[in-house]
Structure formats: structure tokens, C-alpha cells
Image (spheres, rainbow, N blue to C red):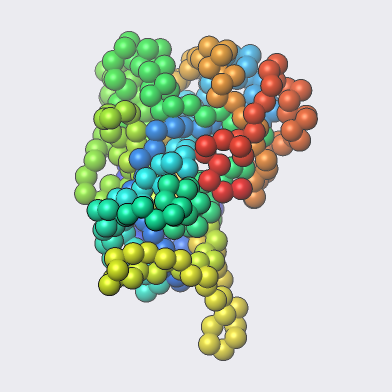
Amino acid sequence: METIYPAQHLSVQQLKSDPQNGYSNYLHIKVPSYPRPELHVAHLSHCTDQTGIFGILNDSGFRSPGYRGKRVVWFSLTVSRAELKEAEDRPMTIVHSDGTEEQYHPPTSRGTTEGQGDYGSGVLKTFATSPAFSSSSRLGSFCFTFPLQDVLDKYSQQFCGGQKPVMRVWNTVLYKQKVMYAVLVHSPSPTDQEEFCKFPELKEEPGSICAFREEPRPHFLWRPQAMSETHDFELVVNRKQNSLSVEPCSWYDENGKYRLRYFVWDEVALALHVREKVLRFEEPELKGALSFCEMGAPPRPIAGFQSFEEAQREVPWPLQRFSESDFAINP
């Protein structure tokens, strides 16, 4: 079951307040304090299975499967370890267990304590446990990861006559345990402008869940609403020292009864409108972008998965493992 909100990106709090979502157990679970940082994301990924990789290599690019809705190719924001660590130096929102929110501003200088700069030393990594930050895939064993700028440049050249693509707020989709914020990307042609004018252009505004920035390089600003699929930790604010720490949670109430610890998680996905055409890449670009992913949980029912050895036989060049890349935040 899914609920679609066209032409808007709704926060988790807004989704909770909609009466039609009363059925959603995951959405209404009371969880411990957790962070909502501001991430600056400069890469996109497209994960697929054996059937998809055959089509991509045969076409030298990506086409819409064409089985549902608009003719689009999907990419998801992919956060690197460095981008997650950098977010700890920006203001973030702390969401407490009672639903209240607190703005946290990190100290301007963190000093030179031992371990600073180690990606594993920050609090955000502890909470980045949802499939949006996982090194595994729920969609298949193959994952292409490109710089956002490269994807937008290809799309501009092949679909926009060299002009900048138009980005719009397409929808929010609430699934059983996932919230997807979809951004529609299309050409500035009069035909596309007329077809998609009912969707507002993506702009950076106070409280935006996601927005696009050109400088210093093309990237998305993303304020994740729910980084943790499973809540095993609590974020603690030391107001006297202006610092954050993490403590394990107890998942039993005062009566010894076990409490649920699963919450919704969210992601941002780009839908590039391609109609019946192919978004093409050169073979060296596809080769450098492709990685093997282990199967994530729960896998998409129609997706197929292979072992690393089986996957290698599908590709005419040595495969790398996504789990060994800079984007493998959590196993």
C-alpha cells in the first residue's frame, strides 16, 4: 500500500498529521532522539539486476522500462563518507522522542582531538543505518554511481540542446516503511514545460527537504527526515559543552515489555524524463561507475541477485565491490 502526494515534498511530521496515514505503524512509532542533518550530495546511483545490466550494456545507457507512468530513468542520491562527516560541522535539527525539535549549532572550532577526520568517529554515521546509506542493494546486484554533474551534463547535451534541465517537485510517496521524495528532471522545451507545469519548480526555501545548488559544484542539499530504519541509539545533547554524543537505547519499558524500534526511512530520487530515448554513456564511463552490491533487506520481490562470481560473468571487465568504495557508509 502506498500514498502519493503529487507536486509536494511533505515532512515526516506532515505525513503523521494526515488522518489517512493512521494505518502506518512505522510512521507513528515513538523513537528516541535522532538527528536531521543537512547533507550536500554530489553523486547519483542507479541499481539494477541481471536483466537491467544486459539492457544497459546493450544500449550503452539507460532507458525507461516503460511499464508504469511517465517515461523516466530513476537515480537516487548517494552520500559519501566525506559528505556525511562534513554535515557534522553544519547546523542540524534534533528531533526528540516527544516530537519536539531543537536546533543544534556545532562549535565553530572542534579543536584537534585525536580521531578527528576519521569517518567512523562522528555521531551521524551511527544513525545512517537505513537502506539509503547502505552498501547493499534492494534492486539487484549491479549499481552505477556517477557524479551528479556528469549525469546532468549528459542529460543537457542529449535532451536539452545544451540548455539547463528543469527540476520540479514531482511527489512524495509513503510506502509501508519508506518515504520517497521524487524530483522530476525534464527538458526546457515548450512541450515538456506545458506537460509538467502543474509541478512546482524545485527551489531552495527555508525548511526545504531537498534543493539543487550549482556552486561550488552541482550538488543536492538534502535534509533527511529519517536516517535510521532501526533505532538502537539515542542522540544526547550536552548543552553546557555544546556537544553531541550517542547512547544505546533500552527497548523495554518500565514494565519490561518490548517496544518496537523500527521507524520509516526516507530517500531522494531523481526521475529523468527520457520518453523512448536512451540516456547514453561511453563504455569507459559505464565501466568506471559500475559496482557489485550484496543483496539488501528486504529485496524488491521482482529483483534478481547473483553472487560476485556470477555477476562478474555478466560484465566484460573486472567488477569492483560497492562495499569497498567511498560510498559504503554502513554494511
Count all numbered tags in the image, as a single digit.
Answer: 0
Quarter of the view holding residue 61: top right
At a point 61% along the width and 48% down the height, the residue shown is 331
Residue 327 placement (x, y as % from top left): 52, 38
Q: Is residue 272 visible?
A: no
231 or 200, which lies in front? 231
136 or 11, which lies in front? 136
Q: Is residue 43 visible?
A: yes
204 or 108, which lies in front? 108
Quarter of the view holding residue 148: top left
Residue 311 placement (x, y as % from top left): 73, 28
130 or 29, which lies in front? 130
Q: Is residue 34 left or right of residue 187?
A: right
At a point 30% along the width and 39% down the height, the residue shown is 211
Q: Residue furthest bottom?
A: 255
Q: Is residue 5 left or right of residue 323?
A: left
Residue 285 position (above or below residue 50): above
Residue 262 position (above or below residue 40): below
At a point 39% along the width and 33% down the height, the residue shown is 42
Residue 279 position (above or below residue 22): above
Q: Is residue 235 left or right of residue 326?
A: left
Q: Residue furthest left?
A: 206
At a point 64% along the width and 37% down the height, the residue shown is 293
Residue 120 placement (x, y as % from top left): 50, 51
Residue 320 placement (x, y as % from top left): 64, 29
Residue 114 position (above or below residue 70): below
